[in-house]
Amino acid sequence: MIRWIAAILGYTFFRFPGAILGFLLGSLLDNLTSKKGGSFQQVFQQQRETVSPADFELNLLSLASLVIKADGTVNQSELDYVRKYFVQAYGTERANATFRVFNEVIKKRQVSAQNISNLLRSRTRYESRLQILHFLFSIANADGHVTEPEVQEINRISGYLGVQYRDFESIKAMFFKNPDSAYKILEIERTATDSEVKAAYRAMAKKYHPDKLQHMDEAYQKGAEEKFRKVREAYEQLQKERGF
């Protein structure tokens, strides 16, 4: 299935020559996915202390591919969302180079969610990993519906990324509207007092404030703004319901 996704991506997007970049990124993904490439600890020791932009882009695309194929179908709207997101974040040429490398490498290797997530967990800030989670849910929701297999796949990746379960449920609730969504977004129970609701809002607004992602590209900052807006909307909904 992953090869099918890669073939579609390759046919649709890959027109930019990236031989040198391909060699570098291919080497990274070979290390992350090869069963014969040594232990992950060995790979970890060989990499730099931070994830380079090129490495991050390829790893993010790899995780995206797992979500796209999670429900057994390759939805064009989800592919288009990823394409648009990468172009917005990195520009057309750079995005095409990453897609091209992914297409070539994935033909020979299976993506390891655990290895890639472990690497990102070791080299990225927690707030950045929260944004990765939001990005993956946005992909799943690109066709207007997040399926249970997609939720399960994102939950699995979330665990590998070291995201706390309450944070996973908070971001998940941003894509599922039900009577408890506002409470889940704010990470509180329905039995919370008004004072606790206010305190939760302040804490969540601080956690998801866009300023925490100033070190990332514009597309990720916009994603942070969307999370921040969802937190505010959840609080305003509870204000209206409770009358305070």
Image: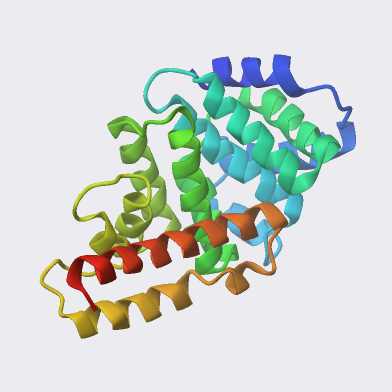
Residue 39 visible: no
Left or right: where 166 falls relative to 222: left
Q: Residue at x 68, y 57 (%)?
A: 46
Q: Is residue 54 above or below residue 110?
A: below
What is the x, y in percent for residue 214?
68, 69
Task: Out of 12 and 194, give the one closest to the viewer.
Answer: 194
The picture quadrant where one finds residue 216 is bottom right
Side of 235 relative to 113 (left or right): left
* Image spot of residue 14 (x, y percent): 78, 23
| Quarter holding residue 166 | bottom left
Q: Nearer the viewer, residue 242 or 38?
A: 242
Q: Is residue 177 visible?
A: yes
**133 left or right of 88 in image:** left
**Quarter where residue 76 is shown:** top right
How many callouts does the rendering have? Answer: 0
> How far across and how far down the image is residue 38, in percent?
57, 45
Question: Which quadrant does the C terminus fall into?
Answer: bottom left
Residue 162 horizontal/vertical position (percent): 41, 61
Identity of the residue drawn at 78% across and 31% down: 96
Q: Tell me which residue sits at (54%, 37%) in the image.
A: 64
The answer to whether residue 238 is left or right of residue 108 is left
**Which residue is pictured at 58% across the width and 68% down the height?**
210
